[in-house]
Amino acid sequence: MRFFLLFFVQLVFFNLAQSQHSFGIRSGFHSSKVKFFVNDDFLENSDALNQFEIGLFYNKKIHEHFALTPELNYLERGGSIPGSISTEETHYNQLELVVPITLQFRVKRFVPFAKLGLSYGYTLSGFTRTALSRRELDFSDNDAYKRSDFGLVVGGGTHFLVTDSWGIFLEYRYRESFSYTMDAELEDIRLSTKNRGQGLVLGVMLTLSPD
């Protein structure tokens, strides 16, 4: 976790002396699910949970239409499993570093954009909950639950430039995990899970060196 916090800070400050750059805050809600695998074969998706996220981002223009846009986010992930007696929910609290490439075009005050990048999430804590009980997840070295969560991020939306120095934006975001967040050997089967999610984010962007 300390590594990607330092990486984000160094990446921002290294580029402050360069050409056009912006930064801002983003926040929203997403529909989060857990994907279940048996012996590495996909079984089914859980029901969705509506989860919260908030984060900071930095936008470094590297070409007329391309930018590097690293983000540092805090988000909730997980899924819901309906049962005959009670629904069981699994919740993960993650710190996430995302490094996408952004394609953007300015049309007067509007700047439509699309993003594609890799993400690394570090799970800070987690728990399962039913109507009758709550259990904290154990992330010790010998346990099935994993803190690291590598994945792919795809997004798109538009900025609206209130002035040349600041604006607001709306973004659709889809996340798909590559790595297992839970991986357990149960007698003669292996049960695993991955995260996925999609949602909408609102944000504010401040441009320090407008064209």
Image: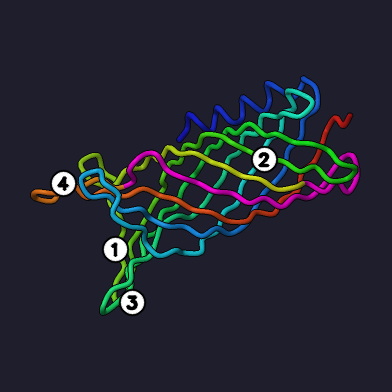
Image marks 4 and 1: residues in contact by CB distance under 8 Å: no
Location of residue 19 with respect to 35 vertically, above or below: above
Report the coloring of the rendering. Answer: rainbow
Residue type (three-letter) at the residue carrying disc 2: Ala
Q: Could you say which is closer to the camera, residue 137 or residue 110?
A: 110
Secondary-structure class at tag 3: loop
Closer to the eye: label 4 or 3: 4
Residue 91, x across and y down, in percent:
40, 59
**Which of the 4 image quadrants contains residue 48?**
bottom left
**Residue at x 50%, y 46% (from the top left corner):** 175
Q: Which residue is mark 1?
A: 135
Residue type (three-letter) at the residue carrying disc 1: Arg
Determine if the magenta segment contains residue 21. no
Residue 131 circle label:
3
Secondary-structure class at tag 4: strand
Q: Which residue is mark 2?
A: 114
> How far separated are the C-alphas under marks 4 and 3?
27 Å
**Which of the 4 image quadrants contains residue 127?**
bottom left
Disc 3 residue crowd, few under 14, some 14–19, many 20+, Cα 10 Å: few
Disc 2 residue crowd, few under 14, some 14–19, many 20+, Cα 10 Å: some
Secondary-structure class at tag 1: strand
> How far separated are the C-alphas under marks 1 and 3?
12 Å
Closer to the eye: label 1 or 3: 3
Q: Earlier in the sequence, mark 4 or mark 2?
A: 2
Determine if the magenta segment contains residue 176. yes
Which image quadrant: the C terminus? top right
Image marks 3 and 2: residues in contact by CB distance under 8 Å: no
Q: Is residue 7 left or right of residue 206?
A: left
Q: Earlier in the sequence, mark 4 or mark 3?
A: 3
The region drawn magenta spans: 159-181
Location of residue 158 with respect to 85 vertically, above or below: above
Q: Earlier in the sequence, mark 3 or mark 2?
A: 2
